[in-house]
Image (spheres, rainbow, N blue to C red):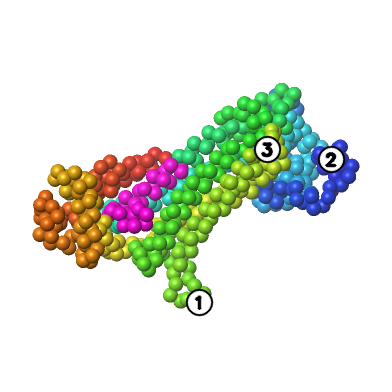
Amino acid sequence: MSVTDKPWGGRFTAENDALAEKFGASISFDQQMAYEDLQGSLAHVQMLAHTKIISATDAQKIAAGLKDLMSELQAGKITFDVELEDIHMNIEMLLAQKIGPVAGKLHTARSRNDQVATDLHLYLKNRLPMIQQAIWELQAAIVKKASVNITTIMPGYTHLQHAQPISYAHYLLAYYQMFKRDAERFAFSEKHLDLSPLGAAALAGTTFPIDRKYSADLLGFSQIYQNSLDAVSDRDFVVEFLSNASILMMHLSRFCEEIILWCSYEFNYLSLSDAYSTGSSIMPQKKNPDMAELIRGKSGRVFGHLLGLLTTLKGLPLAYNKDLQEDKEGVFDTIKTIIPSLKVFTGMLSTLTLNTKKMQQATEHDFSNATELADYLAAKGLPFRQAHRLVGELVFEGIQKQKSLQDFSLAELQSHSPLIKEDVYTALKPEIAVKRRNSAGGTGFEQIKHQLEIAQTELKQIKP
C-alpha cells in the first residue's frame, strides 16, 4: 500500500521505511480488541445518527456493515493487514470494502486516540467478570477445603520457624481473606473502567454536536471522561488493573511457595494430585510440583508489565503519544496469565491430599507450645515477662536434655515454678492450645467455624 493510500497519507509524499512501518504497526496484538473496536464503532454511528450528524440511511448502512464484520470476526473469517497499522484502520478498510465510501463517514467526530482508549476500557470491562469468577471459584475451593479441616492441627510459622500450633483451616482462611481483598480491588477498579473516552477525539473534543452521554449509555458506561485531554492521554485505569493483578499473583505465589515446600520430603505435609504434577526425564522417583512453580514464576511477568507501563507513562507530556501503544501487550498477557493461573491453582488445591498425621506430629516435639506455658503461668498471676523468661529457661534445658516441655516431670516443672500444677499437661497439648485461642479472628475451633459461616454467606452474596 502506497503511503498516499493510507487514511492519514494526504500530507505525505515519501514512502515509509519498510522496517519502520512494521515496527510501528500494532495490529499483531491489538487485533485482540477487534470485537471492542466494532462495539465502539456501532455505538458511535448510532450517536452520529441520533444527533443528525450523518443521515439515518448512511448510519443504517454503516451499522449493517459493522454487524456483518462482527459476525465474520466471530466465525474467524477476518484477516488483518500489517500495512494498515492497527485494528482501527483495518476495521475501517474492511468496512469500506464491504459498503463503499460511505464507510468514511464513521470516523466523523472521533480520532484513533479516543477510539483506542475506548477499546481498551471495553476490553477490560468485558474481561473483568471472568477474573472475578475465577477468584470466586478459588475462594469457594478454599472454604470447602477449610470446612473439612477445622480440627486438622499443623505448625504455624514465623520466620519459617515453628511458632504456635494452628488449625489448617485457619491457615487456609487467611488466604481466603487475601483473595477477598483482591476481588474487592478488582471490583473497585470497575469505577474507573466505567468511564467513556469516546468523543474526546484527538485531544480537544470536536466541533460536531455530538452526544457523548448517548454513546456512553449504548456501551454500558455510566459516565464520560470530563476532560478530553485526560480521556486520551492517561492509562491509570490500566496501571490500576495491572497493580490489582500483581497483588493477586503475589498472593498466589506465596500460596504456591508453601505448597512447594510442604510436598517436599522434608515436610511431607501434603501430596499433589498426579493431574497437577510432572516427573523427571532422568530420575524415575520424582514427582515435581511444576504447576505451583510455574504460577510462582509467572508472578514475575505480571509484576514486569506493571513496572513497564509505569515507566512508559512517567515522562509523557499531554496528550496522546505513540508510547501509549505499549500499554496493550502487557494487559493482554496479564489476562492470559492470571485467569489460567487461578483456574489451575483452584484445581491443584481442591485435589491435594493432606498427611494430617505428619502435620500433627510436627507440633508435638517442637516447643511450639512454649507460649501456652507462658500464658498458663500468666493466668496464674505471674507477670508475663517473668513467665516468658522462665519458659525460655525451660526450653533451653529441654534442648540440652532433648526433651519437649510436655516430657518434663511435674517435679521438674515445679522446680522452676510452684504455680505449675498437673493441669499443665492438658494445656500443653497442641489441639488444646489451638482450641483455646478463641479471641476474635483466632485459630480456635469456634472462631474458625464463625469465620467459615461469614465466608459462606459472603460467597452466596457475591456469586458471579
Q: Which of 450 and 102 is in front in this view?
A: 450
**What amino acid is at disc 2?**
Gly
The residue lying at 54 percent from left, 53 percent from top is: 300
The residue lying at 22 percent from left, 46 percent from top is: 385
**What amino acid is at disc 1?**
Ile
Q: Is residue 220 magenta?
A: no
Label for residue 316? 3
Q: Are marks 1 and 2 in contact (CB under 8 Å)?
A: no
The magenta-colored residue range is 156-183
The residue lying at 39 percent from left, 39 percent from top is: 461
Where residue 99 appears, as percent x and y from the top left, is 78, 40
Q: Residues within 10 Å of mark 1 (few under 14, many from 20)?
A: few
Task: Tell me the mark number nearer the camera, choosing from 1 and 3.
Answer: 3
Give left or right: position of 155 versus 201.
Answer: left
Give left or right: position of 448 versus 25.
Answer: left
Res 415 seen here: yes
Where residue 351 appears, as percent x and y from the top left, is 39, 60
- Above/below status of 297 relative to 207: below
The residue lying at 19 percent from left, 44 percent from top is: 383
Q: In which quarter of the image is residue 6?
A: top right
Residue designated by label 1: 282
Task: Tell me the mark number nearer the camera, choosing from 3 and 2.
Answer: 3
Q: In which quarter of the image is residue 117?
A: top right
Q: Which of marks 1 and 3 is nearer the N terminus?
A: 1
Residue designated by label 2: 9
Q: Nearer the viewer, residue 124 or 320?
A: 320
